[in-house]
Image (cartoon, rainbow, N blue to C red):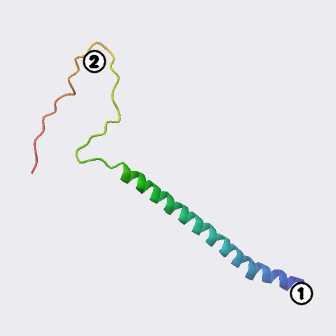
Amino acid sequence: MFKFLIILAVIFYILPKLIKWALKGFIVTQVNKAQADMRQSQKAYQSQKRREGEIDIDYVPKKNGKNSENFGGGEYVDYEEVK
């Protein structure tokens, strides 16, 4: 009977406290890691800031075919300014 009471005490009193303590530690470490990653990405973003009006071109098409040397841009599209 005494052994049974000790097992119940471990299951209902000590085990939940151990689980709570372990989860709290895990969550705190994950939050700290996420905050460190966010700070690092913010520093990287701030170091990549460009001047106003600067353009970044990610894709330049390859020159192929007979008309690639005479290519003067894209097709003109007429627009109307809406106020």
81 left or right, relative to 62: left
User: Label 1 neighbourhood size at 10 Å, few (<14), some (14-19), many (20+)?
Assistant: few
Q: Write down the residue under mark 2.
A: 68
Q: Are marks 1 and 2 in contact (CB under 8 Å)?
A: no
63 left or right, relative to 33: left
The CA span between labels 1 and 2 is 91 Å
Classify mark 1: helix, strand or loop.
helix
Compared with 31, 14 (above or below) is below
Looking at this view, name the residue that lies furthest to the front.
Answer: 47
Q: What amino acid is labelled 1 in the image?
A: Phe
Classify mark 2: helix, strand or loop.
loop
35 left or right, relative to 53: right
Q: Is residue 68 visible?
A: yes
User: Label 2 neighbourhood size at 10 Å, few (<14), some (14-19), many (20+)?
Assistant: few
Q: Write down the residue under mark 1.
A: 2
Compared with 33, 77 (above or below) is above
81 left or right, relative to 11: left
* Closer to us: 67 or 8: 67
Which part of the image, by quadrant, shows the N terminus?
bottom right
How far from the left and from the top, in percent, is residue 5? 84, 85
Which residue does the image show at 71% across and 75% down from the upper left? 18
Q: Is residue 1 visible?
A: no
Which residue does the image show at 27% across and 18% down from the upper left? 68
| Mark 1 / mark 2, whichever is N-terminal | 1
Instruction: Determine which quarter of the picture holds residue 2.
Output: bottom right
How far from the left and from the top, in percent, is residue 52? 23, 48
Q: What amino acid is labelled 2 in the image?
A: Ser
Which residue does the image show at 62% across and 72% down from the upper left? 24
* Closer to us: 70 or 6: 70
How far from the left and from the top, in percent, is residue 73? 21, 26
Number of disc labels? 2
